[in-house]
C-alpha cells in the first residue's frame, strides 16, 4: 500500500502562510473522524467481545459469570479444528477457483477479441446480483427433488438418480464453493483485466517474434505485470471468504451434520440461535488468533521474498 | 496495499494502536453490554395499538385468515396492529433477538415447545386472570403454563402425527394402514416400487425438523428423559436411529427434507407418508393443484414396535403470549378474542382445519362434525404427549443437539451408538446450564 | 495493433528487461499470425466455457421467474419453459412489504456509501499526502480491521444498540455497515490520492491556497472518479449485507436480503417462480447503477494497485 508514497523521513516542505496547525496536526485532524468511527464501531465492540469470551453469558438474560477459560476449552476440546479445517477448505476453494476462472477470462478478453467491452459488462452480472439472491438461485439449481442440475445430469445419464447436493457431506461443501465462486469470479476478472491492460502490447509481440511460446510469454511478460493486482485480489478475497456468511447460512445453514460449518456460521449460530454469547465470542477470539497466525506466516513468506 | 507495505513489526504495532483505540472507545460506550438490554417494557400498557407477531403470517395458507382477524379487530376497536412475522425455522431466534432489544411488544404467537425459552426472559405478562374466564379445555390451558404461571392463552391444541396419501397407498396395493414398524417398512418398500420418484416416507432429515425422530425413539421404548436423567443413548434410542438410517440408505426416506419440503413433495403426490401437525391438511392441500388430494389425506396411527403398544405422537399447539408494556391490555383482549370468540375460532377452523382450544369451540358443529379432525383426535391426539424437554429453557438447543447427531448418523459421519451417547452428554450439559 | 512492427521492444525474461536483436524475415511474422489465430481460438473457447458457467444460472433465474408454479414441480425440468407467464412479476407490484425493503436498502446503502466516502476521503488524504508519527500504525490498523470477524463484532454491536434503544433504526444499520465499507474505502482513496502529483499541492500552496481549500477545491475534483468508485463499492457491499441487517433490524427498517429470506423461506420456499421473479426485480437497481458507473469502479479499484 505504501510503495507509492515517498519515503517517510523526507516530507516535502510546504511553506504555507497563515496555517495555524502544523502539518502533522492537520493530518491527524483529517483522520480524527475516521479514528473516532473505528474506535466506536470496530475496536470497542471487538475488545468487548473478546472479554465476553471469559464469561458465561446468555444473550437473553442479564448478568454474567466469570468462567475463566471454560469457553475456550469447550471449543478446543470440541469442534475447533473441524471448523478451522472447513473454513480453510471453503476459503481456499472459494478464492482459488474464482481466481483461476477470472484470470482465464481476463486473459481471453485481453486478446482483443470482438466485443470484449460488452462481454466484460455481461460477465459482471453474477457479481452484481445480491448475495442472498445468488444463494437462492443456486439453492434452486441444486434442489434435491426438482433441481435443474439433477435434471440435466440424470437425462445425460451421468447420474442414475437425483443427488441431494446440499444434503450430503462433501457435495454440500462443493456446492457452497461453486456458488461463492460464481459470485466472485467477475470481480477478479475485472481487476485482473485492468492489470493486464497495463502490459504494453509491444512486449508480447516482441516476445512472440523472439520465439517465446505462449506459456513462456505468460511467465516472462504477463505475470510480472499483473503480479501486484493478483496478490491483492487474492489477499482481499481470502480475507473476505474467511469470514463469509450469507452463502453458507442460506444454502446449508452449516449442515449437513456440520460439514459446512465455518467460523462465521458457528459464531453466529452459537450467539443468535444458541444465545450463548460467552462461547460465541470465545470462538471468535480463537478465530482471530488463528487468523493472526496465518497473517504472520504470510508476512514472513512475502517478506523473505522481498529480501531476496 | 502491496504486501511489502506491511511488516511484522507493523502488524504488531497495529494491535497496540488498536488497544489505544479501544481505550478511547471505552469512554464512548462505558456501559457494558448486558445482553438482554434494558429491562423495562416501556410504553403505555393502556395503548390501543400493539404488535402481533406470528410465524403463520409467513405461511400462504394461514396469512389471509389471520389478516382478516386483525383487520376486524382494528376496525372494531379503532386501533392499529403492527403485524410481524418470521419464518418458522428462524422464528424463535428472531423473536428472542427482537424481544431482547425491546422492539417486540403486544401479542406473540408461540409454539408450545418455545414457551419456556421465551418465558424465562422475564418479559411476558401473567395472563392467568384473563385465561380463567376463557372457557379453555384443561389440556389446552396447561400448554400455556411455564413454572406455575399462565403465560400463554392457548390458541390451538393438537398433535404432530403421520399423514398418508391414500391414493398412493391404493396404487401400491396397500389395503390398510401399517400397524407395526415391520409392516410400515414393508409398505414403504412397496411404495418405493412405484418408481416415478416417489419418496415413500418424506420424513424430516434436515436439522430444523429432525426432532420428529423423538416419537420414533419413544416407539422403540426410549423415554427421552426420566427421573432427572436423559435416557437418550439407551438401546431403544440407538435402535430407532439405526432404523432411521436403514430407511435413509434404502432411500425410503429422502435426504435434505424439512417440513416444507415434505409438504411440497406430498402436495405433488410424490410422498405417501409424512409427519405434520393437524394443520398439515389445510396447508398441503392448498398448495397442491390436485383438488382431490385433501380427501385422500388420512391420519395414521404411528406404527408401533409390537402389536398392542401405544402409538406415539407429539403434542403440538400454539399459544398467544403477551409482552409486558406497551399495549399490553389491548393485546390481551385481542388474544382472548382471537382464541375464544366462537365465530372467530370457527371461521379460523374452516380456513385452516386447526381445532380450537375452548370447550365451546370444539363443540361447535362445524368442528365436531369434521371427519378428518375427529379421526385425527381419536387416532393421534388421544395418545399424544408433550416433550419432556419443553420444561427447559434450552429446549430448542436440546432438540437441535440431538438432531445434529441423528443427521450425522444419516449421512454416515457417526455410528448410532456413539452419536446417541454424545447426544446424551450434550443434552445433559444443556439441561444443567 | 500492428503485427509488422519493426521497432525492437524490450522483452523482460526475468524481471529485468533486456534488448532483443531485431530479426528480419517473414518467418517470425508467420509465427505471430499463427500464434494470434491460436490465441483467438483459445480465447473464444475460454469465453464460451466460462460463459456457460457464468450465464446459464442467469438464464435459469429468468426461465424460472417466467414459469408457472406447476412447472417447477416437474422432473426432469423443462430446460426451455413453454408455459410463460408474467404473473410472478405482477404479483410483486402488489407486495408493499417488498417495496418497503427495497426502499430501506436504497436508503441505508446510500447513506453508508456517502458516510464512508466522506470519512475515508479525509483519512486517505492524510495517509497519502502527509508524513507523521503513527501514520503507518494507523494505516495498518485500517487494513487489519478488514480481517476482524463481522460475526464477532455483531455480538457486541447488537448488545450496544440494544441498550441504547437503537435496534431497528437506520443509524444502527449504517454504522454497522460502515465497519466493513470504511476500511476498503480508505484504502481505495489513499491509492487515488497517491496518483495526484505532489507538485500540484506545492503549486496550490505557493498560490496561497489554504490546506483545506487545496483539498476541497483542487484535489477532491481530481479524485472524484475514485470517490465515485469507492462510494459505489461501499454501496454494493451495503446493499448485499445480510448478517447485520438480519440481526439488527426488524420489519420497518429491514433491508432486502434478510427481507427476501423472511418473505420466501419457510412455507413459501417452494414458490420458486415468485422467489426468482422477486430476486430478479430487486437486482435491477444495482445492475443499472453498475452498468452505468462500471468504468469508474474499475479505475478506482485498480488505481492504487496496478502501478508497478
Image (cartoon, helix red, strand yellow):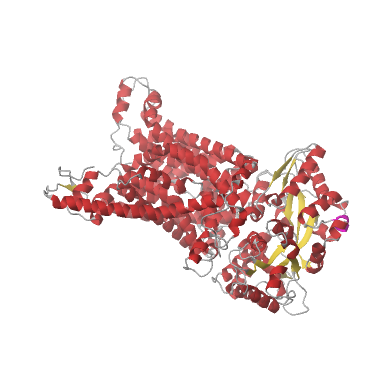
Residue B75, image quadrant = top right
Asked whether residue A273 appears in the rendered view, the answer is no
B262 or C308: nearer the eye? Answer: B262
Could you tell me residue B94's position as x and y percent?
64, 50
Residue C216, image quadrant = top left
- Image position of A159 (left or right of C3): right
Q: How many marks?
A: 0
- Image position of C240 (left or right of C161): left
- Image position of A263 (left or right of A8): right
The N terminus of chain B appears in which quarter of the rendering? top left
Seen at 48% across and 39% down, the residue is C288
Seen at 36% across and 21% down, the residue is C209
The C terminus of chain B appears in which quarter of the rendering? bottom right
Residue found farthest to the front: C82
Q: Which span is picked out in magenta?
A: B358-363
> Is residue B14 depicted above or below C122 in this figure?
below
- Image position of C92 (left or right of B39): left
| Principal secondary structure, stretch drawn in magenta | helix
Could you tell me residue A77's position as x and y percent?
53, 65
Could you tell me residue A304's position as x and y percent?
29, 54
Q: Is residue B361 magenta?
A: yes
Asked whether residue A112 appears in the rendered view, the answer is yes
Seen at 55% across and 69% down, the residue is B411
Could you tell me residue C40's position as x and y percent?
29, 51
> Is residue C208 depicted above or below C101 in this figure?
above
Residue B171, image quadrant = bottom right
C36 or B117: nearer the eye? Answer: C36
Q: Is residue B399 magenta?
A: no
C153 or A157: nearer the eye? Answer: A157
Seen at 64% across and 49% down, the residue is B97
Amino acid at each position: 500500500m505504501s510503495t507509492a508514497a515517498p519515503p517517510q523521513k523526507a516530507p516535502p516542505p510546504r511553506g504555507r502562510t497563515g496555517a495555524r496547525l502544523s502539518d502533522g496536526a492537520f493530518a491527524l485532524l483529517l483522520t480524527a473522524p475516521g479514528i473516532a468511527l473505528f474506535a466506536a464501531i470496530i475496536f470497542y465492540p471487538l475488545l468487548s467481545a473478546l472479554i465476553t469470551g471469559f464469561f458465561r453469558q446468555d444473550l437473553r438474560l442479564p448478568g454474567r459469570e466469570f468462567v475463566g477459560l471454560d469457553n475456550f476449552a469447550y471449543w478446543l476440546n470440541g469442534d475447533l479444528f473441524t471448523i478451522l479445517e472447513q473454513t480453510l477448505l471453503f476459503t481456499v476453494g472459494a478464492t482459488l477457483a474464482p481466481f483461476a476462472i477470472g484470470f482465464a477470462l481476463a486473459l481471453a478478453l485481453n486478446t482483443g477479441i470482438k466485443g470484449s467491452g460488452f462481454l466484460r459488462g455481461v460477465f459482471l452480472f453474477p457479481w452484481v446480483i445480491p448475495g442472498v439472491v445468488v444463494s437462492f438461485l443456486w439453492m434452486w439449481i441444486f434442489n434435491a427433488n426438482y433441481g435443474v442440475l439433477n435434471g440435466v445430469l440424470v437425462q445425460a445419464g451421468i447420474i442414475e438418480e437425483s443427488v441431494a447436493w446440499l444434503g450430503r457431506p462433501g457435495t454440500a461443501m462443493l456446492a457452497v464453493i461453486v456458488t461463492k465462486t460464481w459470485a466472485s469470479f467477475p470481480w477478479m476478472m475485472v481487476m485482473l483485466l485492468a492489470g493486464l491492460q497495463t502490459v504494453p502490447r509491444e512486449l508480447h509481440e516482441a516476445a512472440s517474434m523472439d520465439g517465446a511460446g505462449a506459456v513462456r510469454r505468460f511467465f516472462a511478460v504477463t505475470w510480472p505485470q499483473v503480479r501486484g493486482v493478483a496478490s491483492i485480489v487474492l489477499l482481499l478475497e481470502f480475507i473476505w471468504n474467511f469470514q463469509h456468511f450469507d452463502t453458507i447460512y442460506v444454502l446449508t445453514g452449516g449442515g449437513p451434520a456440520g460439514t459446512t460449518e465455518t467460523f462465521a456460521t458457528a459464531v453466529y449460530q452459537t450467539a443468535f440461535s444458541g444465545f450463548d454469547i460467552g462461547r460465541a465470542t470465545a470462538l471468535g477470539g480463537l478465530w482471530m488468533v488463528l487468523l493472526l497466525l496465518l497473517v504472520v506466516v504470510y508476512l514472513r513468506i512475502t517478506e523473505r521474498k522481498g529480501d531476496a | 496495499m502491496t504486501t511489502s507495505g506491511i511488516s511484522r513489526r507493523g502488524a504488531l504495532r497495529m494491535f497496540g494502536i488498536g488497544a489505544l483505540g479501544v481505550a478511547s472507545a471505552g469512554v464512548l460506550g462505558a456501559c457494558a453490554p448486558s445482553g438482554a438490554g434494558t429491562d423495562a417494557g416501556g410504553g403505555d400498557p393502556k395503548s390501543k395499538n400493539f404488535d402481533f407477531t406470528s410465524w403463520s403470517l409467513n405461511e400462504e395458507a394461514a396469512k389471509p385468515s389471520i389478516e382478516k382477524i386483525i383487520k376486524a379487530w382494528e376496525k372494531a376497536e379503532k386501533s392499529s396492529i403492527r403485524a410481524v412475522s418470521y419464518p418458522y425455522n428462524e422464528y424463535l431466534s428472531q423473536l428472542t433477538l427482537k424481544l431482547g432489544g425491546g422492539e417486540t411488544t403486544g401479542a406473540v404467537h408461540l409454539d408450545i415447545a418455545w414457551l419456556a425459552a421465551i418465558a424465562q426472559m422475564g418479559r411476558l405478562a401473567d395472563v392467568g386472570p384473563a385465561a380463567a374466564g376463557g372457557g379453555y379445555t384443561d389440556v389446552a390451558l396447561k400448554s400455556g403454563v411455564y413454572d406455575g404461571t399462565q403465560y400463554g392463552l392457548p390458541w390451538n391444541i393438537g398433535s404432530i402425527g403421520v399423514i398418508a396419501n391414500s391414493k398412493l397407498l391404493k396404487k401400491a396395493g396397500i389395503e390398510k394402514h401399517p400397524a407395526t414398524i415391520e409392516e410400515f417398512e414393508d409398505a414403504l418398500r412397496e411404495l418405493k416400487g412405484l418408481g416415478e420418484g416417489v419418496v415413500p416416507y418424506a420424513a424430516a432429515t434436515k436439522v430444523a425438523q429432525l426432532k420428529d425422530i423423538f416419537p420414533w425413539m419413544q416407539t422403540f421404548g426410549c423415554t427421552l428423559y426420566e427421573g432427572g436423567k436423559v435416557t437418550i443413548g439407551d438401546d431403544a434410542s440407538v435402535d430407532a436411529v439405526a432404523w432411521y438410517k436403514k430407511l435413509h440408505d434404502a432411500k425410503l426416506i429422502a435426504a435434505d427434507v424439512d417440513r416444507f419440503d415434505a409438504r411440497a413433495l406430498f402436495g405433488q403426490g410424490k410422498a405417501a407418508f409424512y409427519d405434520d401437525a393437524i394443520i398439515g391438511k389445510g396447508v398441503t392441500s392448498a398448495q397442491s393443484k390436485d383438488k382431490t388430494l385433501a380427501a385422500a389425506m388420512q391420519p395414521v396411527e404411528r406404527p408401533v414396535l409390537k402389536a398392542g403398544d401405544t402409538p406415539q405422537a407429539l403434542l403440538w399447539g400454539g399459544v398467544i403470549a403477551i409482552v409486558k408494556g406497551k399495549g399490553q391490555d389491548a393485546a390481551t383482549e385481542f388474544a382472548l378474542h382471537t382464541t375464544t370468540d366462537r365465530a372467530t375460532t370457527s371461521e379460523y377452523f374452516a380456513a385452516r382445519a386447526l381445532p380450537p382450544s375452548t370447550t365451546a369451540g370444539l363443540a361447535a358443529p362445524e368442528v365436531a362434525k369434521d371427519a378428518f379432525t375427529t379421526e385425527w383426535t381419536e387416532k393421534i391426539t388421544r395418545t399424544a404427549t408433550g416433550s419432556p424437554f419443553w420444561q427447559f429453557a434450552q429446549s430448542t438447543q436440546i432438540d437441535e443437539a440431538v438432531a445434529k447427531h441423528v443427521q450425522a448418523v444419516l449421512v454416515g459421519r457417526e455410528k448410532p451408538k456413539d452419536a446417541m451417547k454424545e447426544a446424551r452428554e450434550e443434552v445433559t450439559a444443556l439441561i444443567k446450564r | 495493433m500492428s503485427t509488422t512492427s519493426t521497432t525492437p521492444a524490450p522483452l523482460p525474461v526475468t524481471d529485468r528487461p533486456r534488448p532483443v536483436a531485431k530479426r528480419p524475415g517473414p518467418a517470425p511474422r508467420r509465427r505471430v499470425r499463427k500464434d494470434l489465430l491460436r490465441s483467438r481460438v483459445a480465447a473464444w473457447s475460454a469465453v464460451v466455457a466460462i460463459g456457460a458457467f457464468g450465464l446459464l444460472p442467469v438464464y435459469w433465474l429468468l426461465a424460472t421467474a417466467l414459469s408457472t408454479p406447476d412447472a417447477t414441480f416437474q422432473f426432469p425440468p423443462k430446460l426451455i419453459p413453454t408455459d410463460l407467464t408474467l404473473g410472478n412479476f405482477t404479483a410483486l407490484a402488489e407486495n408493499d412489504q417488498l417495496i418497503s425493503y427495497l426502499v430501506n436498502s436504497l436508503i441505508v446503502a446510500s447513506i453508508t456509501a456517502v458516510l464512508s466516502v466522506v470519512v475515508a476521503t479525509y483519512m486517505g488524504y492524510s495517509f497519502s499526502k502527509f508524513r507523521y508519527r503513527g501514520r503507518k500504525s494507523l494505516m495498518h490498523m485500517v487494513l487489519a480491521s478488514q480481517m476482524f470477524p463481522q460475526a464477532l463484532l455483531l455480538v457486541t454491536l447488537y448488545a450496544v444498540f440494544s441498550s441504547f434503544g437503537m435496534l431497528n433504526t437506520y443509524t444502527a444499520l449504517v454504522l454497522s455497515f460502515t465497519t466493513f465499507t470504511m476500511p476498503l474505502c480508505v484504502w481505495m482513496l489513499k491509492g487515488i490520492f497517491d496518483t495526484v502529483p505532489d507538485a500540484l499541492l506545492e503549486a496550490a500552496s505557493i498560490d496561497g491556497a489554504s490546506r483545506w481549500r487545496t483539498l476541497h477545491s483542487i484535489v477532491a475534483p481530481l479524485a472524484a472518479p475514485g470517490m465515485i468508485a469507492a462510494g459505489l463499492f461501499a454501496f454494493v457491499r451495503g446493499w448485499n449485507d445480510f448478517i447485520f441487517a438480519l440481526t439488527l433490524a426488524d420489519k420497518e427498517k429491514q433491508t432486502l436480503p434478510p427481507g427476501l429470506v423472511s418473505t420466501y423461506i419457510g412455507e413459501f420456499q417452494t414458490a420458486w417462480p415468485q422467489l426468482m421473479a422477486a430476486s430478479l426485480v430487486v437486482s435491477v437497481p444495482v445492475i443499472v447503477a453498475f452498468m452505468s458507473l462500471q468504468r469508474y469502479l474499475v479505475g478506482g479499484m485498480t488505481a492504487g494497485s496496478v502501478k508497478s
